Amino acid sequence: MKNIAVLLMGCGGVGRQLLQHIVSCRSLHSKHGIRLRVVGVCDSKYLVVAPDVFSMELSDKLLLEVCRVKSDSSSLLTLSSSGECQVFTDSELTKKIVDATALLGTGLALVDCSASSETIGVLNRAVDLGCCAVLANKKPVTSKMEDYDKLVSHPRRIRYESTVGAGLPVIASLNRILSSGDPVYRIIGSLSGTLGYVMTEVEDGKPFSQVVKSAKSMGYTEPDPRDDLSGMDVARKALILARLLGSRANMDSIKIESLYPEEMGPDVMSVEEFLDKGVLLLDKDIQERVHKASLNGNVLRYVCVIEGSRCEVGIQELPKNSPLGRLKGSDNVLEIYSRCYKEKPLVIQGAGAGSDTTAAGVLADILDLQDLFP
Amino acid sequence: MKNIAVLLMGCGGVGRQLLQHIVSCRSLHSKHGIRLRVVGVCDSKYLVVAPDVFSMELSDKLLLEVCRVKSDSSSLLTLSSSGECQVFTDSELTKKIVDATALLGTGLALVDCSASSETIGVLNRAVDLGCCAVLANKKPVTSKMEDYDKLVSHPRRIRYESTVGAGLPVIASLNRILSSGDPVYRIIGSLSGTLGYVMTEVEDGKPFSQVVKSAKSMGYTEPDPRDDLSGMDVARKALILARLLGSRANMDSIKIESLYPEEMGPDVMSVEEFLDKGVLLLDKDIQERVHKASLNGNVLRYVCVIEGSRCEVGIQELPKNSPLGRLKGSDNVLEIYSRCYKEKPLVIQGAGAGSDTTAAGVLADILDLQDLFP
């Protein structure tokens, strides 16, 4: 039985779902000769950890208790009374994680399901110590180039599929293509379910403001829809893909088209003000652009384009009859052009969001590392 | 530097392309710390092998010479004069391959790019000895269940991505989904470029016979187009996917719809007779089916359907507006339905044929095994 120790950072929706998947896959994984031993779980405040990470683990009961506590918005501190774990906080939290990585070394997969930019330090130390790293968190792989280089210095020991397109096999497929010497010269993709939905709805003539509001009411957007409309999230994904293709770009070298002007930004107006007044002023411009595109037989899509040194995200006019043009609703779509997929791209399409799907991608990443474990 | 010994069986189009890819990727792979050491190459008649597979390899010059000789339809025997290899034939051929697998054990990737059903013996022995196996050849994985079970008894040591959809990341993606405990309950796909082309062309009103003839003249079909029209090739791919999902099916348990009746089979009439007379008699029926489907807003596609214990290949009426219905030309398309991809499937689409693409898939498979090599 192959033994993979897992230490999970971040137990929001994705982290919790991952713990549930791990527990419910026990018999499947044991059939494949694998045992995932969760030795610790932390959020930004507390680390819940087995008293001896080398020989002990958190029980399935405790893992499900972590899920319950977190989904009740309670504190992980309440678990200290269980008797089967230790709970650390503040400076001790990071120290204990570093201790665990040093102790377990090549036997540990450090999993980052947080949304924090502060995990990069421990991740880099862990990779140095021979640990594997699995990320759903985009921040560490979109940080400055120096951090990125360290993080991927042992490329076989890191996976981050779920940072782009949730569980969709985007990075795994790109890695296959690249390793076979097939040069990828162009990627174009719709990588935001929210913006995919918005752009296909305005195509049918609905006012932009109305579509944004209904997207918010259906829970498709972040609490502040401008977090989606800014394009920053898509830009992070674009940067991850661009770096995979060898680019040395940073976040600030990406050309990003925001769907609202600076004077409607969060520093200037509240969410309510934006939704009640600001966004209405954007309707006419979008409507005109949609109309102009349709005269050319095209539609508008909010996409990332990576081609040579070019990496940009924003609205593009695309043929109605291309995979991206045919896209409806919140699916993600990626078109990959290479020597093998020259005239017609390799297309990967499907749900690119949701904590179930994202966590499934993280779990697939952990299992993909299994040959590195003793 | 990680050292992967490669022994290649089959040097038709795919095998030759693989050798060329290996040679042209030298610097890329060396950057990743990998060295592919080709120790032997065989076709059905001759094995060209390094005098000592443990310490020697075939030079890049000799590998390219193998490609030249084979594309000239010459015999590999001519290479015996090069002085840097040994050439074996007949019973000695298999014996020497078995010797090499025994000698190299876990250091060898045995690669099957042949179309033979006779490689399964050496493949099974190699897997027993700890070798890795990479297949573009569908026969060994569609052989009887007993053989299949042996072949995949160490699932981490075998890859066969290129048996389905050439280089498209179909099996890799399915394995990711399955390993994350996301149960795949339905696969529907168009896995024959030829039949994809035929079905989309008849949709536009062209007679079936005319479409088959132009497909043949454009080189889209096998020399005898009935080899495509029989559906046998699609059935093999369907069986591979069904078994991946856990089915215990055999070739003879798959329901296969042939696009020509038995009385037009190769035992009854020649290719010329079929193309000049036979196929014309099929036009009316196909035309009627196309028409009937279009009345329902549907189109006809030749697909494989795998769902529960059901595994069948044949013509299906599908919504014009589904990924399969929108398919045009010779691209392969696969729709995967699972818990994570429930209402809208995960779709993988792209060129599913061609020796360049197929060989790229084989090479990606070899590199995907790298963590198993010392």
Image (tube, coloured by chain):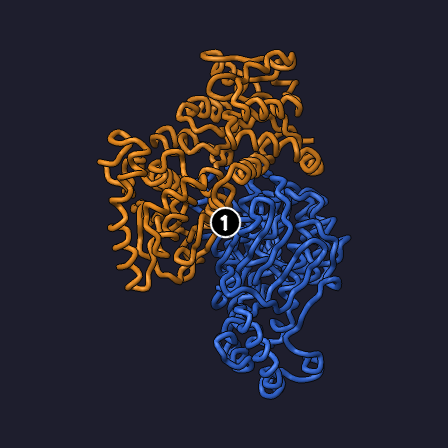
Chain colours: A orange, B blue
> Which chain does tag 1 point to?
A
Closer to the camera in the image, A233 or A246: A233
Residue found 45% across the figure and 37% down from its top: A163
Provide residue A84's location: percent of width, then percent of height: 65, 14
Residue behind mark 1: A350
Q: Measuring from the top left, give residue B357's x and y in whole percent.
A: 49, 58
Q: Would you place residue B324 above or below residue B362 in this image?
A: below
Q: Nearer the viewer, residue A67 or A96?
A: A67
Q: Percent x, y for residue B248?
A: 74, 53
- Residue depicted at 61% across the width and 80% down the height: B285
The residue sitting at the right extreme is: B146
Residue A147 quadrant: top left
Where, by quadrant of the figure, is residue B77 drawn?
Answer: bottom right
Please, what is the three-letter code of the amino acid marked with disc 1? Gly
Q: Is residue A224 above or below residue B307?
A: above
Q: Residue furthest front?
A: A276
Furthest toward the left, the residue is A263
**Quarter that holds the C terminus of chain B:** top right
Q: Describe residue B336's horizontal placement relative to residue A233 as left or right.
A: right
Measured from the top left, where is residue B8 in percent x and y?
59, 54
Label 1: few (<14), some or many (≥20) within 10 Å?
Answer: many
Residue at the image position 65 percent from the left and 72 percent from the top = B230
Whether A319 is drawn above or below B52: the answer is: below
Q: Is residue A107 visible?
A: no
Q: Which one is nearer the viewer's eye here, B258 or B355? A: B258
For label 1, the SS is strand
Could you tell whether A91 is left or right of B303 in the image?
Answer: left
Closer-to-camera residue (B80/A91): A91
Residue A11 visible, this orientation: yes
